[in-house]
Amino acid sequence: MTETLDELARRLEEALPPGAVITDPVRLRTYECDGLTHHRAVPGVVVLPESAEQIAAVVRLCGEYGVPFVARGAGTGLSGGALPRTDGVLVVTSKMRRILAVDLANRRAVVEPGVTNLAITEAVREHGYYYAPDPSSQQVCTIGGNVAENSGGAHCLKYGFTVNHVLALEIVTPDGEIVTLDADDPGYDLLGAFVGSEGTLGITTKVTVRLSRAPQAVTTLLAAFKDIEQGGQAVSAIIGGGVVPAAIEMMDALAIEAAEAAVACAYPRGAGAVLIVELDGPAAEVAHQFAEVERVCLDSGAFELRTAAGPEERAAIWKGRKSAFAAVGRISPAYIVQDGVVPRTALPEVLASIDRLSAEHGIRVANVFHAGDGNLHPLVLFDDAEPGAGERAELVSGRILDLCIEHGGSITGEHGVGVDKSRYMPKMFTDDDLDTMQLVRCAFDSRGLSNPGKIFPTPRLCGEVPGVRKGVHPLVESGRAEQF
Amino acid sequence: MSTPQNTGPRDAPYGTGAHRAAGEALRGTGVTVREADPDDAVAGVMPSWVALPESTEEVAALMRVSASHDLAVVPAGGGTRLHWGAPPDRCDLLVDTCCLNAIPEHASGDLVVRAQAGVTMDALAEALAAEGQELALDVPVPGSTVGGTLATAAAGPRRLRYGTARDLLIGITVVLADGTIARSGGKVVKNVAGYDLGKLFTGSYGTLGIITEAVFRLHPVSPARRWITADLPADPGAVAAALAASQAEPSAVELDWLAPSPRFTVSALVEGAAVEDRAHAVRAVLGGDGGGKAPGWWGAPPGEVLLELRVPPSGVDGALSAVAARGLPARVRGALASAVLQIAPAVDIGGPEFAAFVSGLRGDVAPFGGRLTVLAAPPELARLADRWGPVGALPLMRRVKERFDPGRRMSPGRLAGGI
Ligand SMILES: Cc1cc2nc3c(=O)[nH]c(=O)nc-3n(C[C@H](O)[C@H](O)[C@H](O)COP(=O)(O)OP(=O)(O)OC[C@H]3O[C@@H](n4cnc5c(N)ncnc54)[C@H](O)[C@@H]3O)c2cc1C
């Protein structure tokens, strides 16, 4: 540890409760990566604060020493967003796990950032409510991480993402001030801009979430198709027909094979693709839409349909899909989880191109995706013992992102840019676009201490605000404006 | 500020060399530029010129000239909400977006549309309806544009189900004060690459730059709609809460009330499949007739002078009692279940009375977690009132403004705190 960090660690110990500052190298190592495990860095210091005030004190001390800081929730992020800095402080929210208020009359709850996504739903389920965004990692990932990543889930097709379900945030700004961003604030939607900023605009210390009414009826349907084209056709026809299901998920043959091997999900034999369609809402509406979806699937060539009669059967249908990421471990020694988006209508073309890429480079790709919104999660499989295979897999994975950009899509639908994809940002955005985004960064964090090195390939030096008058503005002097 | 006055360019009185040079430079861009007339005044402030650009690049050219001549710029759409917000401190150039009126892309299969900022919401609705789709933002004032709707963060009754402009906007193109063209988002709904500038520009009242293009997610037009309307003697907020919690899933629950009378008209909209069943479920809570049609006031602003009241849903009835207790006749209308209501005081209200009403009511609703802002009021009426009330994030908003518009030339003074 450098002298600066040494001294900073001592100051942090004074400011925080006993045991809240970790400098022991062995313990530091447990924080060296998030869910993207091939990027690693042992943090300089780890702190485990218990309140917004303590986080503010940490951030102010970091400012005093010019040391960068990185927030971390559960560390399930898949883009290296919580990758620590060896020369910095990692602020872990694991001691801030209280649900502060549940306000059913106003359909909202106030929680600390370290509360897990699922814990919110569990706290209100008995009253017939739930927190809608449902990332597959919901048992472990934190609401603070969800806010930073603007996380989605299988059901965001109908219900939207984290940003659509957060009503207010308390944050510690990179200057160490505690500020509330409220959806009801007039003026710029800073709340909306903060959500999805991957920890680069400050640290979330409190989240007010919207609670949703549990739907009256839920119906889940599994449709098996001969191939992925038929499945894709069904997706387009369902949505084109005016039905917005809660979720539409698709898996291709290789992903099904992996899921079978891992959890014996017993999907229809011989399926080249399966589609999971979930409908929810008022019972009468669901019944109506279900008939429509069934018809469309059969018209598109589905050779088997299964409908879940209750929660157990629903869980059985979802089992294969939910296990898919981990399951490919059964059929491949190593894999890359990719996350890209294409316009839904481009799905067939893009999937065909992925097939070609796969054949050309001898790298298998299992496709699992949120078909309703064109969010692909190709699992790029390789054998890390085979020389060159890792590089080929990287290449294929990168080319898939190129395909997404070419088709007017995005390099990430939900996993974020982090360190993993910052180099792709210039492919999706111009320098002017990126510089403009960084104006926001400069407004919040002019010294670039909050999670530096993430999102943007080349950080902007903010400097002084150009042209801002130091003295009294002439308009203020003349009484025509308040000071801004 | 009751008569239009000309206020700039800074240090360059009307008719001087600097003024003439700025005018020539604006015309030199090749964009249509004309001298302003009194009809072009923005909340009482008259610009020198009006420009009518036809593309994002033309807007950028105008902004570059404005930067080098220190011109204050106010973008304007259909002019339907140009009187919203505070008057600008100065305004040299009005950028009228009327000719940015193309819809370059409607990917109906993807339920996405890309429209230029000057496209009116009616024109957009018409184009989308041809494919059985809609942008689920009700903006009932005829002539309002895409850009103006975003800049004022306007939303209508169905915010309950679909959210507001910020929830439906998936991509944006803007031109900054120095002429930089920037985009964020894209044309897919699910996208977390980079900061979301669209959010920042929603509600920005022209103070950060000029919105030139927007991409929205769309919804299929509902096959059927039913309105259920009833008059209630008291506690409409409690009824709205019951409706919002019911399984009827109304898309909107609206209030129309002439304070302080004890008659609250509440109307709920159900849409989608199985509307009859759901209308029945709404009637079970609300009572009322099954006429099925929208009431005449549906979605229309309650008056010319407008305050906006936002309160947690459980505070609605308390806040409405506070309005009644003020004793001043006012029409109150808006999204009851979302608890975002507009209040229009009687037109003959005077400045001091108005200021007292605003600050008094602001104090009354605060204990319910409510907040009150002045959306629209002529400068002479609002002069004594604090339009915005306390805004916690104001220092951060100022810093954003300073970064985006360090010369303070974009609609200066229109937002809270002189932003
Ligand atoms: C098996 C698996 C499945 C997944 N499925 C999904 C899915 O379906 N949908 C989806 O969207 N994502 C998914 N993810 C990704 C991941 O779970 C989400 O991004 C999640 O939101 C991260 O939460 P976390 O608490 O683990 O955050 P971390 O990984 O600890 O951090 C993520 C980012 O958030 C920042 N951060 C964390 N806490 C704060 C805070 N309090 N203030 C400011 N910044 C903070 C970090 O600096 C970092 O940039 C999945 C991951 C795994 C491993």
Image (cartoon, grey):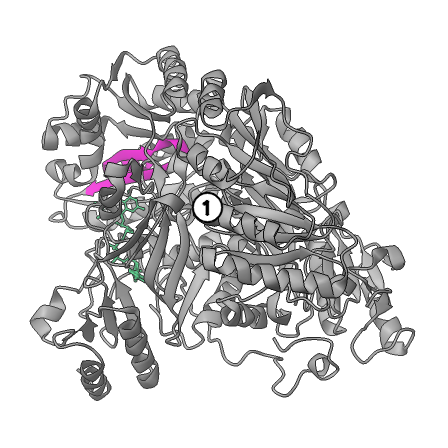
Please determine whether, in this image, residue B34 is positioned above or below residue A27. above
Q: Describe the element under mark 1 as helix, strand or loop.
A: helix
| Residue A217 appears in the picture as rendered | yes
Determine the residue positioned at 49% across, 23% down: B283
Q: Which residues are magenta?
A: A357-381
| Residue A417 appears in the picture as rendered | no
Please name the residue that numbered disc 1 is placed on. Answer: B313
Q: Is residue A213 left or right of residue B120?
A: left
Please determine whether, in this image, residue A201 is positioned above or below residue B166. below
Looking at the picture, how far across and down is residue B267, in whole percent?
57, 31
Looking at the picture, how far across and down is residue B395, in whole percent?
51, 72
- Crowd rating for badge 1 (residues with CA inside 10 Å; few <14, some 14–19, many 20+): many
Residue furthest left in the image = A26
Please determine whether, in this image, residue B125 is positioned above or below residue B42. above
Looking at the picture, how far across and down is residue B155, in whole percent?
59, 44
Label 1 marks a residue whose chain is B
